[in-house]
Image (cartoon, grey):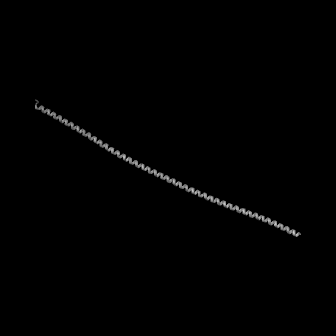
Amino acid sequence: MFPVSMMQERRQKENEKKKKIVEIQKKKENILQEKASLIMDHMKTVEENLAACEEKRKLDLLVKSELSKLKSEVAKRNVQRSRMLESRMQSDLEKKLNHLEEKKKERERMLDSLKKERHFHATQIRLQKDELLEEVHNIQVQKSWNKANNLLRSFENTV
Protein backbone atom coordinates (compact mmCIF):
# COMPACT_ATOMS: atom_id res chain seq x y z
CA MET A 1 0.00 0.00 0.00
CA PHE A 2 1.42 3.27 0.94
CA PRO A 3 4.98 3.42 1.76
CA VAL A 4 5.92 4.45 5.24
CA SER A 5 7.42 7.68 4.16
CA MET A 6 4.22 8.76 2.55
CA MET A 7 2.38 7.86 5.60
CA GLN A 8 4.81 9.75 7.63
CA GLU A 9 4.47 12.63 5.27
CA ARG A 10 0.75 12.46 5.50
CA ARG A 11 0.88 12.27 9.27
CA GLN A 12 3.31 15.08 9.27
CA LYS A 13 0.96 17.13 7.07
CA GLU A 14 -1.93 16.19 9.29
CA ASN A 15 0.09 17.14 12.32
CA GLU A 16 1.01 20.41 10.64
CA LYS A 17 -2.65 20.99 9.80
CA LYS A 18 -3.58 20.19 13.38
CA LYS A 19 -0.85 22.54 14.59
CA LYS A 20 -2.15 25.23 12.22
CA ILE A 21 -5.67 24.62 13.43
CA VAL A 22 -4.47 24.80 17.02
CA GLU A 23 -2.53 27.98 16.20
CA ILE A 24 -5.55 29.49 14.46
CA GLN A 25 -7.72 28.53 17.41
CA LYS A 26 -5.16 30.03 19.77
CA LYS A 27 -5.04 33.19 17.63
CA LYS A 28 -8.82 33.19 17.59
CA GLU A 29 -8.89 32.77 21.36
CA ASN A 30 -6.28 35.50 21.74
CA ILE A 31 -8.25 37.78 19.47
CA LEU A 32 -11.45 36.97 21.35
CA GLN A 33 -9.66 37.55 24.66
CA GLU A 34 -8.29 40.87 23.36
CA LYS A 35 -11.76 41.85 22.16
CA ALA A 36 -13.23 40.74 25.47
CA SER A 37 -10.51 42.66 27.28
CA LEU A 38 -11.17 45.73 25.10
CA ILE A 39 -14.91 45.37 25.69
CA MET A 40 -14.33 44.97 29.43
CA ASP A 41 -12.05 48.01 29.44
CA HIS A 42 -14.64 49.92 27.46
CA MET A 43 -17.39 48.77 29.85
CA LYS A 44 -15.23 49.78 32.81
CA THR A 45 -14.64 53.20 31.23
CA VAL A 46 -18.38 53.52 30.51
CA GLU A 47 -19.20 52.60 34.10
CA GLU A 48 -16.62 55.08 35.39
CA ASN A 49 -18.06 57.75 33.10
CA LEU A 50 -21.58 56.88 34.28
CA ALA A 51 -20.44 57.03 37.89
CA ALA A 52 -18.69 60.35 37.23
CA CYS A 53 -21.80 61.68 35.47
CA GLU A 54 -23.99 60.50 38.34
CA GLU A 55 -21.63 62.12 40.86
CA LYS A 56 -21.60 65.31 38.78
CA ARG A 57 -25.40 65.25 38.56
CA LYS A 58 -25.63 64.79 42.36
CA LEU A 59 -23.20 67.66 42.86
CA ASP A 60 -25.17 69.81 40.40
CA LEU A 61 -28.38 69.02 42.30
CA LEU A 62 -26.65 69.80 45.58
CA VAL A 63 -25.32 73.08 44.19
CA LYS A 64 -28.74 73.95 42.80
CA SER A 65 -30.32 73.10 46.15
CA GLU A 66 -27.79 75.25 48.03
CA LEU A 67 -28.24 78.04 45.49
CA SER A 68 -32.02 77.94 45.89
CA LYS A 69 -31.60 77.97 49.69
CA LEU A 70 -29.28 80.98 49.43
CA LYS A 71 -31.69 82.75 47.10
CA SER A 72 -34.52 81.98 49.52
CA GLU A 73 -32.50 83.34 52.45
CA VAL A 74 -31.58 86.45 50.49
CA ALA A 75 -35.23 86.94 49.55
CA LYS A 76 -36.27 86.51 53.20
CA ARG A 77 -33.62 89.01 54.31
CA ASN A 78 -34.76 91.43 51.63
CA VAL A 79 -38.37 91.06 52.76
CA GLN A 80 -37.35 91.54 56.39
CA ARG A 81 -35.25 94.55 55.45
CA SER A 82 -38.09 96.09 53.46
CA ARG A 83 -40.54 95.40 56.31
CA MET A 84 -38.13 96.99 58.79
CA LEU A 85 -37.70 99.96 56.47
CA GLU A 86 -41.46 100.30 56.06
CA SER A 87 -41.92 99.98 59.81
CA ARG A 88 -39.24 102.60 60.45
CA MET A 89 -40.76 104.91 57.84
CA GLN A 90 -44.21 104.41 59.36
CA SER A 91 -42.80 105.09 62.82
CA ASP A 92 -41.06 108.24 61.53
CA LEU A 93 -44.28 109.36 59.86
CA GLU A 94 -46.24 108.71 63.06
CA LYS A 95 -43.68 110.74 65.03
CA LYS A 96 -43.91 113.58 62.52
CA LEU A 97 -47.70 113.38 62.59
CA ASN A 98 -47.68 113.44 66.40
CA HIS A 99 -45.25 116.36 66.34
CA LEU A 100 -47.47 118.21 63.87
CA GLU A 101 -50.54 117.47 66.00
CA GLU A 102 -48.70 118.77 69.07
CA LYS A 103 -47.76 121.93 67.15
CA LYS A 104 -51.36 122.30 66.02
CA LYS A 105 -52.62 121.90 69.59
CA GLU A 106 -50.03 124.40 70.81
CA ARG A 107 -51.12 126.87 68.11
CA GLU A 108 -54.75 126.31 69.08
CA ARG A 109 -53.85 126.92 72.76
CA MET A 110 -51.94 130.04 71.80
CA LEU A 111 -54.85 131.20 69.62
CA ASP A 112 -57.29 130.55 72.46
CA SER A 113 -54.96 132.42 74.80
CA LEU A 114 -54.78 135.34 72.34
CA LYS A 115 -58.56 135.32 71.97
CA LYS A 116 -58.99 135.35 75.74
CA GLU A 117 -56.43 138.13 76.06
CA ARG A 118 -58.16 140.17 73.34
CA HIS A 119 -61.50 139.56 74.96
CA PHE A 120 -60.00 140.59 78.30
CA HIS A 121 -58.50 143.75 76.76
CA ALA A 122 -61.73 144.51 74.92
CA THR A 123 -63.64 144.11 78.20
CA GLN A 124 -61.13 146.34 79.99
CA ILE A 125 -61.40 148.94 77.24
CA ARG A 126 -65.20 148.80 77.45
CA LEU A 127 -65.03 149.16 81.22
CA GLN A 128 -62.60 152.05 80.91
CA LYS A 129 -64.85 153.62 78.29
CA ASP A 130 -67.87 153.14 80.55
CA GLU A 131 -65.90 154.64 83.45
CA LEU A 132 -64.83 157.57 81.28
CA LEU A 133 -68.38 158.06 80.06
CA GLU A 134 -69.58 157.92 83.62
CA GLU A 135 -66.90 160.43 84.65
CA VAL A 136 -67.87 162.66 81.74
CA HIS A 137 -71.49 162.29 82.76
CA ASN A 138 -70.59 163.01 86.38
CA ILE A 139 -68.58 166.08 85.30
CA GLN A 140 -71.47 167.26 83.20
CA VAL A 141 -73.85 166.63 86.05
CA GLN A 142 -71.43 168.38 88.42
CA LYS A 143 -71.18 171.33 86.01
CA SER A 144 -74.93 171.43 85.76
CA TRP A 145 -75.18 171.39 89.54
CA ASN A 146 -72.58 174.06 89.80
CA LYS A 147 -74.42 176.19 87.28
CA ALA A 148 -77.65 175.49 89.01
CA ASN A 149 -76.09 176.47 92.35
CA ASN A 150 -74.57 179.55 90.82
CA LEU A 151 -77.88 180.49 89.34
CA LEU A 152 -79.59 179.78 92.61
CA ARG A 153 -77.07 181.92 94.50
CA SER A 154 -77.31 184.66 92.03
CA PHE A 155 -81.07 184.43 92.24
CA GLU A 156 -80.91 184.46 96.03
CA ASN A 157 -78.54 187.38 95.94
CA THR A 158 -80.81 189.27 93.70
CA VAL A 159 -83.79 188.55 95.75
Q: In this view, does 142 lie above or below 98?
A: below
Measured along the vertical axis of the image, is residue 50 above or below residue 93? above
Q: Which part of the image, by quadrant, shows the N terminus?
A: top left
The answer to whether residue 91 is left or right of residue 46 is right
Q: Residue 150, percent across and down?
A: 84, 68
Q: In this view, does 100 lie to the left or right of 78?
A: right
x then y, percent, for residue 106: 61, 59
Label total for image: 0
Residue depicted at 61% across the width and 58% down the height: 105
Q: Is residue 120 left or right of 151 when viewed as pictured?
A: left
Within the image, what quadrant is residue 109 found in? bottom right
Q: Residue furthest right?
A: 159
Please tell me in which quadrant of the rendered image residue 33 appears: top left
Q: Which residue is drawn at 48% across and 51% down?
A: 79
In the image, residue 156 above or below residue 77: below
Q: Residue at x 63, y 58 (%)?
A: 108
In this view, 154 is above or below 57: below
Left or right: 117 with respect to 66?
right
Question: Looking at the rendering, in which quadrant would you find the C terminus?
Answer: bottom right
Q: In which quarter of the image is residue 26?
A: top left
- Measured as percent of width and height from the top left, residue 135 is found at 76, 65
Q: Which residue is drawn at 80% across and 65% down?
A: 141
x%, y% of residue 136?
77, 64
